[in-house]
């Protein structure tokens, strides 16, 4: 308990601690992200191999309904697996950050052991937030289309950008809340709105930095492969199976390298907001004392 440093942190301290945690525990966070996304990589390579086999048949007959259904089913399987693995990676990363923040042993196996069906809560949180944001833009678009005015659509879209950004910032700690407080998706969003009140700007800055780091990772690992694919398409050639595998591998590496950073930052921000608003540091201290009565009571011998 003496090693646990629970105190309010400035935005700079949150970011500094984020990168220190990431750097000092790189194998832990990379392993947590790599494990689920490796399954996605295998599924993507399998789908690419199936497509390459189909394309290798000379003058093949038109695709039958069964083959078309298999292709669509395979694509749907990869997509569903991708979203499930996103949920699992986010959830396990939150648990790992929590253990490290509270100076507890953290491991890849231990983090995933606590996930289970909670990964679905991550997807539900994304779905509900996307539903609200996307629903707003859809309503504006339909209204503009009904009125036959592109100006209404353009102005409406612009007017919704700021509220959408604010909503995303205010719900930024919903996933840590769902995992660490065992809250349902709706309750986690409500809690996030409570905790982040007055701190939306700080969370916006974190979002901007996370997006920047993500795009740097894309440029470093994926851009060279994308250039080769664009050159292949420009030459009116279908990208080879090897090139497609290389593309999926580049996506996998960039996800493993930069994927955990945002989750680490928002998990630390969750604890920071609880310390600031709910005196979590004192609550944690009292809980640790209550669980060790023999150590804390005076000796009568």
Image (cartoon, helix red, strand yellow):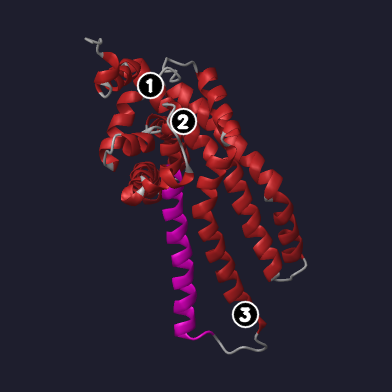
Q: Quadrant of the C terminus?
A: top left
Q: Is residue 88 highlighted in magenta?
A: yes
Q: Which residue sits at x=37%, y=45%?
A: 122
Q: Please tell me which of labels 1 and 3 falls first in the chain.
A: 3
Is 280 situated left or right of 300 in this image?
right
Q: Which residues are magenta?
A: 63-90
Is 140 situated left or right of 206 in this image?
left
- Residue 130 sits above or below residue 52 on the image: above
Q: Residues within 10 Å of mark 1 (few under 14, many from 20)?
A: many
Could you tell me if residue 259 is visible in this image? no
Could you tell me if residue 212 is visible in this image? yes
Secondary structure category for the residue under label 2: helix
Residue 119 placement (x, y as % from top left): 37, 49
Q: Please tell me which of labels 3 and 2 falls first in the chain.
A: 3
Residue on which disc 2 sits? 100
Label drawn at residue 273: 1
Residue 291 placement (x, y as % from top left): 26, 24
Label drawn at residue 53: 3
């Amino acid at each position: 308990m003496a090693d646990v440093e629970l105190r309010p942190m400035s935005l700079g301290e949150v970011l500094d601690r984020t990168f220190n945690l990431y750097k000092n525990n790189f194998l832990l966070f990379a392993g947590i992200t790599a494990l689920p996304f490796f399954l996605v990589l295998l599924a993507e390579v399998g789908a690419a191999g199936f497509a390459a086999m189909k394309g290798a048949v000379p003058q093949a007959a038109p695709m039958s309904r069964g083959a078309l259904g298999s292709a669509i089913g395979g694509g749907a399987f990869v997509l569903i697996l991708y979203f499930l693995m996103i949920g699992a990676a986010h959830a396990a990363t939150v648990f790992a950050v929590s253990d490290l923040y509270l100076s507890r042993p953290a491991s890849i196996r231990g983090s995933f052991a606590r996930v289970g069906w909670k990964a679905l809560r991550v997807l539900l949180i994304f779905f509900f937030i996307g539903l609200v944001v996307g629903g707003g833009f859809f309503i504006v678009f339909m209204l503009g289309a009904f009125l036959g005015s592109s100006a209404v659509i353009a102005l409406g879209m612009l007017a919704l950008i700021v509220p959408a950004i604010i909503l995303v910032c205010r719900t930024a700690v919903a996933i840590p809340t769902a995992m660490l407080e065992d809250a349902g998706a709706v309750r986690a969003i409500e809690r996030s709105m409570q905790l982040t009140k007055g701190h939306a700007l700080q969370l916006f800055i974190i979002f901007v930095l996370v997006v920047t780091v993500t795009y740097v990772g894309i440029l470093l690992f994926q851009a060279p492969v994308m250039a080769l694919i664009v050159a292949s398409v420009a030459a009116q050639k279908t990208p080879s199976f090897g090139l497609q595998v290389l593309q999926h591998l580049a996506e996998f590496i960039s996800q493993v390298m930069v994927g955990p950073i945002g989750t680490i930052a928002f998990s630390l921000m969750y604890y920071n907001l609880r310390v600031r608003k709910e005196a979590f540091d004192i609550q944690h201290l009292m809980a640790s004392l209550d669980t060790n009565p023999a150590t804390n009571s005076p000796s009568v011998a």
